[in-house]
Image (cartoon, rainbow, N blue to C red):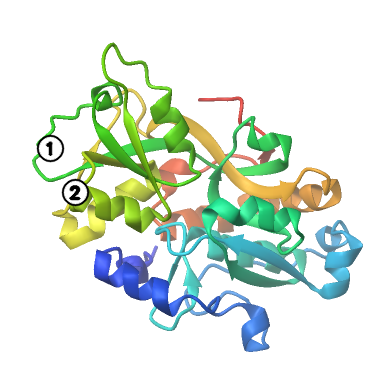
Amino acid sequence: MRKHVTLTLIGAAAVSALLLTGCSGGGGGADTGKPNLPQGDEVSTKVDPSLKKLLPEDIRKKGSIDIAVDIPFPPLSAYDKDNREIGFDPELGRLLGQKLGVDVVLSKQAFDSVIPSMQAKKHDIIMSGMNDTPEREQTITYVDYTHGGFAILVKPGNPKKITGQSALCGKTVSVQKSTIQGELLRATKCSGAPVTVMELPTDLDALTALRAGKSDAYSADAVVADYVAATTDDGKAYEIVRDPENPAGFNPVYSGIGVLKSNTQLVDAIQKALQALIDDGSYQKVLERNHMEAYGVKSAEINQGGKTQ
């Protein structure tokens, strides 16, 4: 299959440029006046009228689903040269809309505000690589769509000799604010000094801290860390520290599409639409396009945040 070549843009300068050009919200259906459907070689599917009937009346009436996405966060999300949202989340989001027979509006939203924003009814669902945790399940119902852990990036040559999670004790690790990595790192059992967690506003800030020597390591979802390590400066900017017992990352967890817990009708529609995409093969193709095959799920399940394997 033809791979997604337009995501090779994670160098610091390129990402900074994308952050600037992406402020308007990109190529969402509401901005262009045209349905936000797959284009070019993007994966496409067919509408299922029976699934559209499952949607809440307010969404069927307005004819669209508003999806909150934290962009850029390759390979989950990014902008291409035409300021179009690409990556796993935007592409799968368009497929969900296509399967449900409604338009899709992709709205750029900072990760630490996606849940409050949805509670304020600014968005219908969240597709932002959000880990499904018991704490978040108090507010959000998750339709889980990936399974993986976190990974650690270090400078070339691994000067601090970091070999795994326990080796981070006494070290400073930069992470994006409000991500599960901070919680997991703070919970690391250390015989001496604990892990110092440096929480920064964006994932790019956390990466920059490592590159500038302000942190000893960087941590993010394994799928993101893998991509960063492989594409930044032709793979020469960072080394990835892997967990030999968990190829999909340390402390593997589920991530999912977030829907307000009270919106049970929308949860049901999204779950059945995702299952339909799994069944027709389009979900797998989106994984492959974005080099995420190792993190896919076999079926669309709800709230698996209590599971680790």
Q: Can residue 281 be seen in this view?
A: no
Location of the N terminus (image quadrant): bottom left
Q: In this view, does 222 lie to the left or right of 108?
A: left
Question: Image height check: is 194 above or below 77?
Answer: above
| Circle 2: element type | loop
Towards the viewer: 189 or 47: 189
Amino acid of disc 1: Asn
Mark 1: give few (<14), some (14-19) or many (20+) Cα within 10 Å.
some
Q: Distance between the residues labelled 1 and 2?
A: 9 Å
Whole-percent x, y for residue 130 in the image: 55, 46
x and y, in percent, of residue 270 in the image: 73, 52
Q: Nearer the viewer, residue 115 or 10?
A: 115
Categorize mark 2 by other alpha carbons within 10 Å: few (<14), some (14-19), many (20+): many
Between 64 and 293, the residue placed more toward the observer is: 64
| 296 displayed left or right of 16 | right
Please report the residue visible at 33 percent of the width from the left and 56 percent of the height from the top.
205
Q: Can residue 144 be seen in this view?
A: yes
Residue 184: image location, x then y, percent: 44, 29
Residue under label 2, please give it. Answer: 238
The furthest residue to the top: 191
For residue 18, what is the image quadrant?
A: bottom left
Reading the image, the residue beneath label 1 is 158
Q: Where is residue 3 in the image (x, y as percent from the top left)?
A: 37, 64
User: What element does badge 1 sit on?
Assistant: loop
> What type is the residue that disc 2 sits on?
Tyr
Give the residue drawn at x 17%, y 60%: 234
Q: Which residue is drawn at 24% across and 30% down?
A: 171
Going from the N terminus, do you reach mark 1 or mark 2 first? Answer: 1
Q: Residue at x 33, y 68 (%)?
A: 15
